[in-house]
Image (spheres, rainbow, N blue to C red):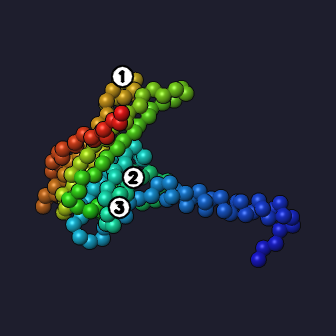
Amino acid sequence: MIRFASPAVSAMAAIIVTLPLALLSSCTTVMPTARQPVDGPRARVRLASFADELTVEVVQPDGKKGTLYTRSGFYPGKSDLDMPKGSSGWPGHNEYYVVGNQMVLAHSEITRVPSGVSVVASHCEVSGRIWLDSGKDYEIGVVTGQGQKGWDMTSCFITATELIASPNGETTMKPVPVLPVLAPPRRG
């Protein structure tokens, strides 16, 4: 056991040791990932977007809803399921198994602020529903239209493609419909 000269030094040492551990554990608490199925009807999905710009709500193996996140280097959970490359050309990370034969909800919210300015230049929030068949590979992404200044978005929308690998190693990208999210009825 380590003994410190004063209670203040002991308290400071405890903070120095526990604070980084608390911050690391909060990443998985704040950004939990839906549990992936290990068997049964499954599909594979890649989230092709920058970190934190895209989430996908799925039904987990236990029937409860969970959320998949586009990850950055700061968040755990990157996985490489060896999926075919898609339109993003991003192999490897942000690939998940999901329960197959289900409608998922994709959501993106992007805010752009030009450097040196403290006001929001443009904001985009969009959602869409996508059906994922069992046994297939999908890539879900978000596309933004850029204005002349680069940081001003003129449009944004969710995209989805089925990735079909051919024997020669090339990938065919078949567009998948992204359906609108139905708004809940207004109450009196």
Mark 1 crowdedness (10 Å alpha carbons): few <14, some 14-19, many ≥20: few
Most foreground residue, 175 or 131: 131
Q: Residue at x 24, y 64 (%)?
A: 42
Looking at the rendered image, the quarter that the N terminus falls into is bottom right
Residue sticking out furthest to the right: 5
Residue 69, disc: 2
Secondary structure found at label 2: strand
Q: Is residue 160 left or right of residue 6?
A: left
Q: CA distance from mark 3 to mark 1?
A: 44 Å
Find residue 19 and report its horizontal and vertical position in percent: 65, 58
**Quick one: label 2 or label 1, which is nearer the N terminus?**
2
Which residue type carries mark 3? Lys
Find residue 105 and report its horizontal and vertical position in percent: 30, 48
Most foreground residue, 185 or 15: 185
Q: In this rendering, which labeled residue sits more in front, label 2 or label 1?
A: 2
User: Which quadrant holds residue 186?
Assistant: top left
Which residue type carries mark 1? Gln
Q: Is residue 137 visible?
A: no
* Label 3 close to label 1 by CB (< 8 Å): no
Q: Is residue 34 above or below residue 72?
A: below
Q: Residue at x 50, y 54 (%)?
A: 30
**Quick one: label 3 or label 1, which is nearer the N terminus?**
3
Badge 3 is on which residue? 64
Residue 148, disc: 1
Residue sticking out furthest to the top: 148
Q: CA distance from mark 2 to mark 3?
A: 17 Å
Q: Is residue 86 above or below residue 3?
A: above
Q: Is residue 83 above or below residue 140?
A: below
Q: Is residue 152 left or right of residue 46?
A: right
Q: How many marks?
A: 3
User: Which quadrant holds residue 118?
Assistant: top right
**Quick one: label 2 or label 3, which is nearer the N terminus?**
3
